[in-house]
Amino acid sequence: MKTAVRGDVLTFRGNPFWEAERDSLVFQRDALVVMENGRIAAWGLADELLPSLPPDARIEHYPDHLILPGFIDCHVHYPQTEMMAAFGEQLLDWLNHYTFVTEQGFGDADHAREVARVFLGEQLRNGVTTGCVFGTVHAASVDALFEEASRHDLRILAGKVCMDRNAPAALLDTPLTAYEESRALIERWHGKGRAEYVITPRFAPTSSHGQLEMLGALAAEFPDIAIQSHISENLDEIAWVRQLFPSCRDYAGVYQRYGLLRPRAIYGHGVHLSDAELEMLHDSGASLAHCPTSNFFLGSGSLNLRRCVEAEKPVKLGLGTDLGAGTSFSMLQTMNAAYMASQTHGKPLTAAQAFYLATRGGAEALGIADKVGGIEAGMEADLAVLDLRSTPLLDFRMRHVRDLSEALFVQMMLGDDRAVAATYAAGKRVYRKSGRSV
Ligand code: GUN
Ligand code: ZN
């Protein structure tokens, strides 16, 4: 059964960091996106495609709205939903005082399910159709998330956090249980529907040499599986890594030693990486997730994203909310913060570049760009529909917009969850906003 959405469409056929906007960005007024069996069957000018639709095809019409590929959140901790906006600390104290306390609650599977439901509901309200998500150390936290995600047929990547030192005893696994439980989760979930497992050492300081070795062995057994962790977020963290791994040249060198730098390995932050480390990431094919609201919130610093994306040896980059250190589920607000971060390094991020990072760029960084992140025939039908006049202020401001670039920039600076009119996953509407506040 074919269905379709009609409205203005924005997608990317190239990378606006490397190519002119007119070559990389695709914008089509009054387009039709035709969906069948969870995929995009065709898309193009509505007037041209309408005659080819069967008479009973359901068409949802969004006049004056923008239809985009669903947003991709490349780095987020679902268990931290309940501790967003915890006051006043930098990374290591924040982990000890808030995060490690909250995460202990996920030994209770009912609790995990409840938080997973709230988390995914918020993602859909924000047009996020794919997340690369950290669970807690408890395998059941990942079961709960995958189960809830499967109810909406979401493409989701997630993994059990592995850590066997420098955290409360209730949150520690061992090298062997980390390996065995991660492997069992791979067997239970990887490739089931749209679920993908991600091997997830929390970060170097909470894994022993033995555990990193076991996770490297697991990664070698499953060479196509994604890996996620953190790198070079905070200066005290970096000094600690130097103490804990004195024989490694630097932070990236730790992950490299254990075979954890490779294509589809994505590391959160990378704020303070050296040129040599960025080169190591490039050479290995690993990616970074830029998490600007989190970096501002924890006082970590701000990533100079052009050092990654525009380098001679570029590093693939996506955007992450990094909740609960991140302050918003909204990818528009995350783009806003990415713009602020770019201003501290002199050359502002354009709207096209920001929307690219939140869609196709994120998909490239996660190695899923053949499936999601773009509007193209054959891709999975994950869409976000933006109401460009979602608040009284935006209604007024949009009357004074001169071109598409300005319209997109205004949305990412002033828009938030209220801008998301509807979200589609695998061709089905999974969220619709119940009314406009204008
Ligand atoms: N580094 C290790 N764990 C975490 C976490 O949960 N959040 C952030 N922002 N950084 C981390
Ligand atoms: Zn994180």
Image (cartoon, rainbow, N blue to C red):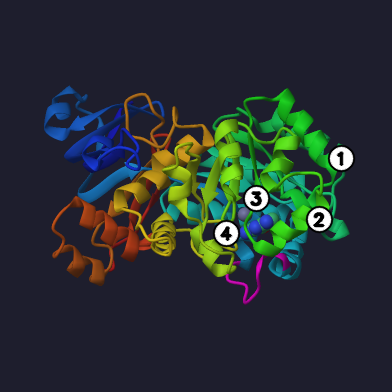
Measure the C-alpha gap from mark 3 to mark 2. Answer: 17 Å
- Residue 313 placement, left or right of 81: left
Q: Secondary structure at mark 1?
A: helix
Whichever of callouts 4 and 1 sits on the residue coming sooner in the sequence is 1
Question: Does the segment drawn in magenta span residue 164?
Answer: no
Q: Amino acid at mark 2?
A: Gln
Whichever of callouts 1 and 3 sits on the residue coming sooner in the sequence is 1
Q: Which residue is mark 3?
A: 230
Residue 210's tag is: 1
Q: Amino acid at mark 1?
A: Gly
Q: In the image, which residues are magenta?
A: 84-92
Measure the C-alpha gap from mark 3 to mark 4. Answer: 13 Å
Q: Residue, x 68% and y 49% (percent of image)?
A: 135
Q: Amino acid at mark 4?
A: Leu
Measure the C-alpha gap from mark 2 to mark 4. Answer: 28 Å
Q: Secondary structure at mark 3?
A: strand
Q: Which residue is mark 4?
A: 323
Q: Is mark 3 within 8 Å of ligand 1?
A: yes
Q: Is residue 97 above or below residue 331?
A: below
Whichever of callouts 2 and 1 sits on the residue coming sooner in the sequence is 1
Question: To which quarter of the image does residue 295 belong?
Answer: bottom right
Mark 3 Cα within 10 Å, few/some/many (few <14, many 20+)? Answer: some
Q: Residue, x 71% and y 60% (percent of image)?
A: 237
